[in-house]
Image (cartoon, helix red, strand yellow):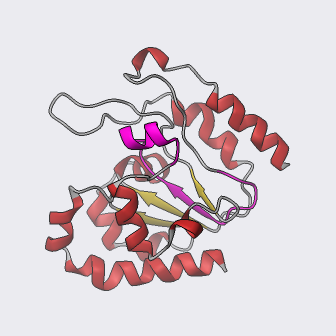
Amino acid sequence: MSEAALEALVRDIRACTVCAGELPLGPRPVLHVSTTARLLIAGQAPGTKVHASGQSFTDASGDRLREWLQMDNAMFYDVRRVAILPMGFCYPGRLPRGGDRPPRPECAPLWRDRVLAFMPDIRLTLLVGAYAQNHVLGPGNVTARVLDFRSFLPRYFPLPHPSWRTTGWERRSPWFGEDVLPALREAVRQALD
């Protein structure tokens, strides 16, 4: 499968209007993929800042994720090595009581497997948050999966969503910084070597 064919698919995705009527800011699919990527970051869906910038994780969640990974922007956004493919490619809007809506249910079934078929060199997929984990692994508890991360290696590494809401969870879960983050950094290093 060629890079040109993947680029054509990405153009089709960026022109997608399947959910246009449900998206408060309109469609603006955001994804970063290549045929040579070795690390895949599977997240939730863009927030308003990512919708505005057109680049994944250009917000506080991205800062925290890069901190967890100890990865600078140059490496994080090197699409030849790192792909970012969320469960939903467009900003889904806000929930009435705050927080972003779930990714649109049409997106992943319509596009995800087609994109993944062009990325045969993926060695490790970071499953960031419940939506990515549930899509790939089936229903489950994020904390339990993160605690049991070793059972998903070498193919997957489950992580909590790196939003500000995770701050309290991290304080109550010192094992995350002591055990999970060093293992995450090593798994990412091996995937990218």
**What is the tally of numbered marks visible in this picture?**
0
144 in magenta? no
Q: Residue at x 41, y 22 (%)?
A: 23
In the rendered image, which quarter is residue 191 located in?
Answer: bottom right
Judging depth in this view, the residue of 151 and 129 nearest the camera is 129
Judging depth in this view, the residue of 139 and 40 nearest the camera is 40
Q: Which residues are magenta?
A: 33-55
Quarter of the image containing the C terminus?
A: bottom right
- Asked whether residue 47 is in view, the answer is no
Q: Is residue 167 above or below residue 4?
A: below
Q: Residue at x 48, y 42 (%)?
A: 53
Q: Is 81 left, or right, of 56 in this rendering?
A: right
Q: Residue furthest top?
A: 21
37 in magenta? yes
Q: Residue at x 60, y 24 (%)?
A: 16
The percent coordinates of residue 10 (x first, y second) are 69, 37
Q: Is residue 110 above or below residue 129?
A: above
Q: Is 33 left, or right, of 93 in this rendering?
A: right
The percent coordinates of residue 83 (x first, y second) are 61, 56
- Asked whether residue 80 is in view, the answer is yes
Judging depth in this view, the residue of 72 and 177 nearest the camera is 72
The percent coordinates of residue 57 (x first, y second) are 44, 53
Q: Is residue 114 above or below residue 37?
A: above
In the rendered image, which quarter is residue 184 located in?
Answer: bottom left
The percent coordinates of residue 67 (x first, y second) are 38, 72
Q: Is 172 left, or right, of 36 in this rendering?
A: left
